Image (tube, rainbow, N blue to C red):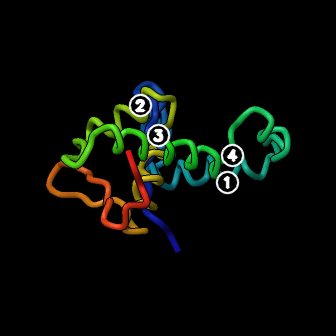
């Protein structure tokens, strides 16, 4: 089974991958799959405990982004905030786009955020979330 994924590569790396895949007469996706499998099989990976010392675990990243998103929405007031301003404000606060999007998705799924056009608004109907 395969899954579709979008990856971002520097232009020079992508060009080299395309040339190498062409030289080997394989699709780029097959080339990248084989390269990833070879890398994983090599055992040249940091142990999870070493990685956690230098990187913030995903749950903490999403938690930090959630706090930022709620703060930005609280400051925006009842009119809400443009999607681009929410994302940009969260990134300027030091969050990643992935963590920001995960926070927005979780808050939206929980019924705390609503999107109307290009604006996010905070649901304050229960009065539990004050600005």
- Is residue 80 rendered to the left or right of residue 42? left
Quadrant location of the C terminus?
top left
Q: Earlier in the sequence, mark 1 or mark 3?
A: 1
Label 1, label 3: how far apart the Cα atoms are: 37 Å
User: In the rendered view, would you say 7 is above or below 111?
Assistant: above
Examine the rendered structure and indicate whether residue 29 appears above or below residue 106: above
Dot 3 falls on a residue whose secondary structure is: helix
Which residue corresponds to the image point at 69% horizontal and 46% vertical from the top-left?
57
Dot placed on the residue nearer the N-terminal end, 2 or 1: 2
Q: Which mark is residue 57?
A: 4
Residue 116 coordinates in the image, percent (x, y): 17, 57
Mark 3 to mark 2: distance in Å?
37 Å
Q: Marks 3 and 4: in contact by CB < 8 Å?
A: no
Name which of mark 3 and mark 2 comes first in the sequence.
2
Mark-to-mark CA distance, 2 and 1: 20 Å
Q: Kindly identify which residue carries mark 1.
A: 37
What residue sits 42% from the left and 35% below the top? 90
Indicate which disc, 4 or 1, sits on the residue closer to the N terminus: 1
How many neighbours does mark 3 have within 10 angstroms: few (below 14), some (14-19), or many (20 or more)? many
x and y, in percent, of residue 102 in the image: 47, 54
Task: Look at mark 3 in the image and give the residue it sits on.
Answer: 68
Which residue bears the numbered disc 2?
Answer: 15
In the orientation shown, which residue stands out farthest toward the left? 117
For discs 4 and 3, the disc positioned in front in the rendered view: 3
Q: Nearer the viewer, mark 4 or mark 1?
A: 4
48, 123: nearer the viewer = 123
Q: Quadrant of residue 61 in the image?
A: top right
Disc 4 from disc 3: Cα separation: 17 Å
Q: Is residue 93 left or right of residue 63?
A: left
């Amino acid at each position: 089974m395969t899954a579709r994924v979008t990856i971002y590569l520097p232009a020079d790396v992508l060009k080299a991958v395309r040339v190498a895949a062409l030289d080997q007469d394989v699709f780029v996706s097959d080339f990248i799959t084989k390269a990833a499998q070879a890398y994983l099989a090599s055992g040249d990976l940091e142990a999870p405990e070493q990685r956690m010392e230098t990187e913030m675990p995903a749950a903490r990243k999403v938690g930090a982004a959630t706090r930022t998103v709620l703060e930005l929405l609280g400051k925006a007031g009842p009119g809400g905030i443009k999607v681009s301003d929410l994302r940009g404000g969260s990134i300027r606060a030091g969050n990643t786009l992935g963590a920001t999007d995960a926070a927005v998705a979780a808050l939206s799924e929980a019924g705390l955020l609503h999107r109307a056009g290009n604006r996010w608004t905070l649901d304050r109907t229960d009065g539990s979330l004050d600005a």
